[in-house]
């Protein structure tokens, strides 16, 4: 089923990939030798068929007939098994039957992986640009530019782990960018540039069912929500694919950036000096309604299986947020630089520079964020109790030196090298975590107890449930700006008409990178977790700190063959290794990017999630010879890409260590490695030896390291055949046919990584796009 050549039903998916793009550009003088204009537009419409395997209830199960399941199904009140594992019709929850309609019907036999989804990804992008250049005097120029962009995207799967369509998301982006630049020639070799700019980015990220009043459709009061929060709750049934809209939606965001910059350059002898300063003001207003629709789990603890608990309407666990936390962040950046481009010798050029950056820590105008005071163990409002308004202290020593050189050893050989230090301007996403602490954000949990049994008719009763010890997100007060050092040394040798060869070493080192860990994680042991925590009044305390690091080393070789007898080649090969202790701030499918043991974050240092040891790219252009009817003005182009697969981490879905590791936002336990798991001939059904892993003993961490499994590599051959036709003396038309992944190779996604799911662990259930063909028409006049 994963062979791309047979992956799609030819009748049902004959339009599995359609891409329409139209662009134009116009330029010319408004006033001769004084005012010029440029106007362009680009419009894209794309449709892409996707495929994922999922598990859905069978036709019998939808009727309450669970005879296909192993083990008895019990009445949760009498503890007596239902006869034949059939739940009587009068015991089926009407709410559950309504939610069953959101599951698609099976498309394949069996009880697991019995549904192959084929939704269509849709993308619309529009972009308009206009620029006017006006010469005021012989020394003064004025340039005005405005760009507008719009994106309307439908993603059938809103989460990496989602496997059923119907719960995707709509992304609507709108962007404005405008600048006014004034240039003045100050004298011989001296120019000053003054720029003012404004950028605005709006993003509305809504769930697929954001326009549906689900509470009214199901006839329940617990989904009586503000229209902005419409949609389905997240529902997890043990053994089946999850249904429901993403719990982190909707996200409504608008970010404004105001910019003012001044640069001056002047020449003195063999030196060309540049200096400048810039001020940027960033204002972010956002809404993130996390978990407001709630999350329900049906584990099978009440009646013997997850699906029977669901059909009876008895969730084993519920979670819902109460939030009043609109986000408002304000920050200012002030930067200066000085640079000297010096030629001490005709064959030697040096570039020396120094940059200084100061970014004010983001603050809320009303100081609505809250954090933990570690000395008192209390939650305090920022700006009070000795806590700064942002939760962190300013970092005012961010000096960034730069150095580069180019040395011509002879007429055909050049050596180049450089070093630079670059600071991260900061992620507002890090600071906004402090909006998800009490009192602005609280969670309530619901589960069966002596006080009552939650039902689908009222899973979040206002008089029931409990508010668990809150999980907090706090920033380390010692947090400083992350920075990366880059360096490289390159040798290039020209062989005249034979092309040019280059060999380079490039490396980088990241320091004080952002990471998260749980400073309230207890040691593995039996007993109630909460009593064993360092701060028993709280759940997980996610500390964001600048404690991660990274290193990258690479050998890069390239060969460039210029046009000769109609053929031009460009090829590059990179051999590299990337290591870090966190590859991103948030988790992803490859790795949670969160320590298994937060008391030992150093154990997370391993291959990066994006480590690519080998990458080879070959690009070519061949102009067909002769003046024949079909070869005149005809070119054949192509790109060949080959690269290694990326690493990934085996995990457990349940908290085996009993330390609070329950998800990517708070860490995941790992299995034990008990043997060699690599295979000489891996297949999608068995990418690695799942038998080489085992569940650790209860109340222990697993010994499996981070990113120890290597995923599938990638290979693609893309080609293009084009012909230019002269319509008239001033009009040209270019026709082009393009094929991506011409050989229709199946490029598999990562394998399933849940070691406690023996049915899928080690299997690959999805693949990247198959062969795609498109046609293009370009008119130049």
Image: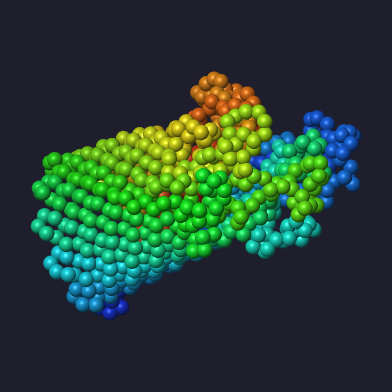
Residue closest to the far bottom = 31
- At x 75%, y 51%, the residue is 460
Q: Position of residue 508 (x, y in %)?
A: 33, 40
Give the quadrant of residue 435. bottom right
Q: Position of residue 628 (x, y in %)?
A: 33, 53
Residue nearest the observer in this picture, 225 or 113:
225
Q: Position of residue 265 (x, y in %)?
A: 20, 62
Give the quadrant of residue 326. bottom right
Would residue 133 be seen by someone viewing this image from the given angle? yes
- At x 73%, y 57%, the residue is 223
Residue nearest the observer in this picture, 186 or 751:
186
Residue closest to the far top = 675
Residue nearest the observer in this picture, 466 or 116:
466
Question: Left or right: 21 with respect to 447?
Answer: left
Would residue 759 be seen by someone viewing this image from the given angle? no
Against 250, residue 406 (above or below) is above
Q: Quadrant of the C terminus?
A: bottom left
- At x 11%, y 55%, the residue is 270
């Amino acid at each position: 089923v994963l062979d791309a050549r047979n992956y799609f039903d030819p009748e049902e998916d004959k339009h599995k990939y359609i891409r329409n793009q139209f662009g134009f550009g116009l330029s010319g003088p408004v006033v001769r030798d004084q005012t010029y204009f440029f106007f362009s537009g680009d419009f894209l419409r794309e449709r892409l068929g996707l495929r994922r395997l999922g598990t859905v209830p069978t036709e019998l199960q939808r009727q309450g007939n669970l005879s296909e399941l192993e083990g008895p199904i019990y009445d949760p009140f009498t503890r007596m098994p239902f006869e034949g594992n059939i739940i009587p019709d009068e015991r089926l929850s009407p709410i559950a039957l309504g939610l069953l309609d959101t599951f698609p019907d099976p498309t394949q036999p069996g009880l697991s992986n019995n549904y192959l989804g084929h939704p269509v990804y849709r993308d619309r992008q529009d972009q308009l640009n206009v620029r006017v250049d006006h010469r005021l005097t012989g020394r003064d120029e004025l340039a005005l530019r405005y760009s507008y962009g719009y994106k309307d995207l439908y993603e059938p799967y809103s989460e990496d782990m989602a496997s059923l369509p119907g719960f995707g998301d709509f992304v609507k982006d709108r962007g404005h960018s405008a600048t006014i630049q004034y240039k003045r020639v100050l004298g011989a070799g001296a120019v000053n540039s003054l720029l003012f700019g404004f950028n605005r980015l709006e993003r509305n990220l809504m769930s697929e069912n954001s326009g549906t009043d689900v509470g009214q459709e199901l006839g329940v009061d617990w989904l009586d929500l503000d229209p902005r929060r419409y949609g389905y709750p997240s529902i997890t049934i043990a053994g089946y694919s999850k249904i429901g809209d993403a719990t982190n939606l909707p996200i409504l965001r608008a970010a404004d950036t105001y910019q003012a910059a001044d640069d001056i350059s002047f020449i003195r002898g063999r030196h060309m000096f540049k200096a400048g300063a810039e001020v940027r003001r960033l204002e972010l207003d956002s809404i993130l309604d996390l978990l407001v629709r709630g999350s329900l789990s049906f584990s099978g603890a009440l009646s013997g299986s997850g699906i029977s608990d669901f059909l009876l309407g008895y969730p084993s666990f519920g979670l819902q947020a109460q939030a009043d936390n609109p986000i408002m962040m304000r920050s200012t950046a002030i930067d200066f630089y000085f640079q000297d481009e010096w030629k001490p010798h005709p064959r030697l050029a040096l570039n020396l520079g120094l940059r200084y950056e100061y970014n004010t820590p983001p603050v809320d105008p009303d100081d609505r964020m809250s954090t933990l005071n570690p000395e008192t163990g209390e939650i305090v409002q920022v700006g009070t109790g000795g806590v700064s308004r942002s939760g962190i202290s300013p970092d005012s020593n961010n000096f960034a030196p730069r150095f580069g050189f180019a040395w011509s050893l002879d007429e055909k050989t050049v050596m180049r090298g450089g070093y630079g230090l670059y600071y991260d301007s900061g992620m507002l996403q890090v600071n906004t975590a402090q909006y998800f602490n009490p009192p602005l954000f609280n969670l309530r949990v619901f589960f069966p107890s002596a006080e009552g049994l939650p039902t689908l008719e009222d899973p979040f009763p206002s008089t029931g449930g409990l508010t668990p010890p809150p999980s907090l997100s706090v920033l380390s007060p010692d947090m400083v700006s992350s920075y990366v050092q880059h360096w490289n040394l390159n040798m290039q040798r020209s062989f005249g008409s034979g092309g040019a060869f280059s060999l380079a070493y490039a490396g980088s080192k990241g320091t004080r990178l952002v990471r998260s860990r749980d400073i309230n994680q207890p040691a593995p042991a039996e007993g109630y977790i909460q009593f064993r925590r360092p701060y028993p009044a709280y759940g997980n305390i996610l500390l964001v700190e600048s404690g991660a690091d990274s290193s990258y080393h690479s050998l890069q070789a390239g060969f460039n063959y210029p046009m000769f007898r109609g053929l031009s080649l460009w090829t590059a090969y990179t051999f590299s290794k990337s290591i870090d202790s966190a590859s991103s701030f948030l988790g992803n499918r490859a790795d949670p990017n969160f320590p298994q043991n937060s008391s030992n974050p150093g154990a997370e240092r391993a291959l990066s999630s994006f480590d690519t040891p080998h990458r080879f790219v070959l690009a070519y252009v061949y102009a067909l010879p002769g003046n024949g009817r079909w070869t005149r003005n005809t070119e054949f182009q192509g790109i060949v890409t080959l690269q290694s697969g990326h690493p990934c981490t085996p995990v457990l879905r349940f908290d085996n260590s009993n330390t609070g590791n329950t998800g990517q936002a708070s860490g995941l336990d790992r299995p034990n490695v008990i043997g060699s798991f690599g295979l000489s001939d891996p297949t999608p059904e068995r990418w690695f030896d799942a038998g080489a892993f085992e569940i650790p003993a209860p109340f222990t961490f697993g010994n499996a390291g981070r990113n120890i499994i290597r995923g599938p590599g990638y290979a693609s051959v893309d080609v293009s055949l084009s012909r230019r036709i002269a319509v008239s003396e001033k009009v040209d038309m270019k026709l082009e046919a393009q094929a991506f992944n011409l050989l229709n190779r199946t490029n598999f996604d990562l394998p399933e990584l849940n070691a406690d799911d023996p049915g899928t662990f080690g299997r690959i259930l999805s693949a990247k796009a198959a062969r795609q063909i498109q046609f293009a028409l370009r008119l130049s006049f």
